[in-house]
């Protein structure tokens, strides 16, 4: 999916494979090592990819 814009706490997206009106539980970043689609950018995951083979999370929830 593509993030189009963010307004007042709402994410506006395109290209998502879901049924309209269903709740979303989790949105994950695109990581080319796990997916087949081409991405324009990897965002905050770019600097984390070198640890991918041994990481269990991206470090945001570890004290």
Image (cartoon, rainbow, N blue to C red):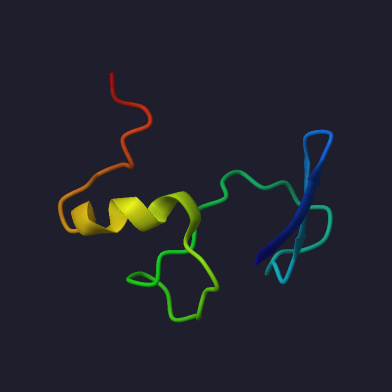
Q: Is residue 19 above or below residue 32?
A: above
Front position in the image: 17 or 43: 43
Task: Determine the image quadrant of residue 60.
Answer: top left
Q: Count the numbered circles shown.
A: 0
Q: Is residue 12 above or below residue 2?
A: above
Task: Determine the image quadrant of residue 53.
Answer: bottom left
Point 33% across, 42% down: residue: 58
> Does residue 21 appear to the left or right of 58 in the view shown?
right
Q: Is residue 13 above or below residue 56?
A: below
Front position in the image: 19 or 16: 16
Residue 20, position as x, y percentages in the image: 83, 60
Residue lying furthest left = 54
Residue lying furthest top = 63
> Does residue 52 appear to the left or right of 18 in the view shown?
left
Point 51% across, 53% down: residue: 28
Residue 45, position as x, y percentages in the image: 40, 53
Point 21% across, 57% down: residue: 50
Point 50% across, 80% down: residue: 37
Q: Is residue 44 above or below residue 41?
A: above
């Amino acid at each position: 999916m593509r993030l189009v814009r963010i307004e007042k706490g709402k994410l506006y997206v395109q290209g998502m494979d879901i049924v309209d009106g269903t709740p979303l539980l989790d949105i994950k970043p695109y990581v080319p090592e796990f997916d087949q689609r081409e991405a324009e950018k990897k965002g905050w995951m770019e600097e984390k990819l070198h640890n991918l083979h041994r990481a269990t999370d991206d470090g945001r929830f570890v004290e």
